[in-house]
């Protein structure tokens, strides 16, 4: 199968991935309802895929370091 060239199909594919991701998150949160878990799911997948967060404290330190790095530049 070749690469997708039609923009409509690419948008459809992106929408299906988004739908699958939302369904997965919904399933996890239905099984284990927790605001903390919801925050960790968002942080893990959308903030910085190259950085492994150990928890919310690790994420806050990451944000502080990023803010300080921008001030230094």
Image (cartoon, rainbow, N blue to C red):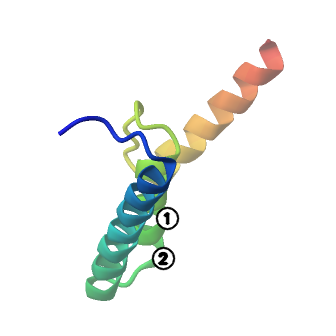
Q: Residue at x 71, y 20 (%)?
A: 69
User: In the rendering, at what x and y percent does residue 45 appear?
Assistant: 42, 50
Left or right, 73 with respect to 12, comes to right
**Residue at the left extreme of this rendering:** 1
User: In the rendering, at what x and y percent does residue 21 appear?
Assistant: 36, 65
As rendered, which of 60 and 48 lies closer to the eye?
48
How many marks do you count on the picture? 2
As rendered, which of 40 and 57 lies closer to the eye?
40
Q: Which quadrant is the C terminus positioned in?
A: top right
For the residues labelled 1 and 2, the Cα–Cα distance comes to 6 Å
Q: Residue at x 33, y 76 (%)?
A: 23
* Disc sitting over residue 39 in the figure: 1
Residue 27 to residue 43: above or below: below
Q: Residue at x 82, y 21 (%)?
A: 71
* Disc sitting over residue 35 in the figure: 2
Q: Residue at x 59, y 46 (%)?
A: 60
SS at mark 2?
A: helix
CB atoms at circles 1 and 2 under 8 Å apart?
Answer: yes
Left or right, 16 with respect to 63, comes to left
* Disc sitting over residue 23 in the figure: none
As rendered, which of 20 and 73 lies closer to the eye?
20
**Residue at the front extreme of this rendering:** 6
**Residue at the top extreme of this rendering:** 73
Task: Characterize the local packing of mark 2: few (<14), some (14-19) or many (20 or more) Cα atoms within 10 angstroms.
Answer: few
User: In the rendering, at what x and y percent does residue 24 appear?
Assistant: 30, 72
SS at mark 1?
A: helix
Q: Which quadrant is the N terminus positioned in?
A: top left
Task: Characterize the local packing of mark 1: few (<14), some (14-19) or many (20 or more) Cα atoms within 10 angstroms.
Answer: few
Quarter assignment of residue 36: bottom left
Residue 62 to residue 38: above or below: above
């Amino acid at each position: 199968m070749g690469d997708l060239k039609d923009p409509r199909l690419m948008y459809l594919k992106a929408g299906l991935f988004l739908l699958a991701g939302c369904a997965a998150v919904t399933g996890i949160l239905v099984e284990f309802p927790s605001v903390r878990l919801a925050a960790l799911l968002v942080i893990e997948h959308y903030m910085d895929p190259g950085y492994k967060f150990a928890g919310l404290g690790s994420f806050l330190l990451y944000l502080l370091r990023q803010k300080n790095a921008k001030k230094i530049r």
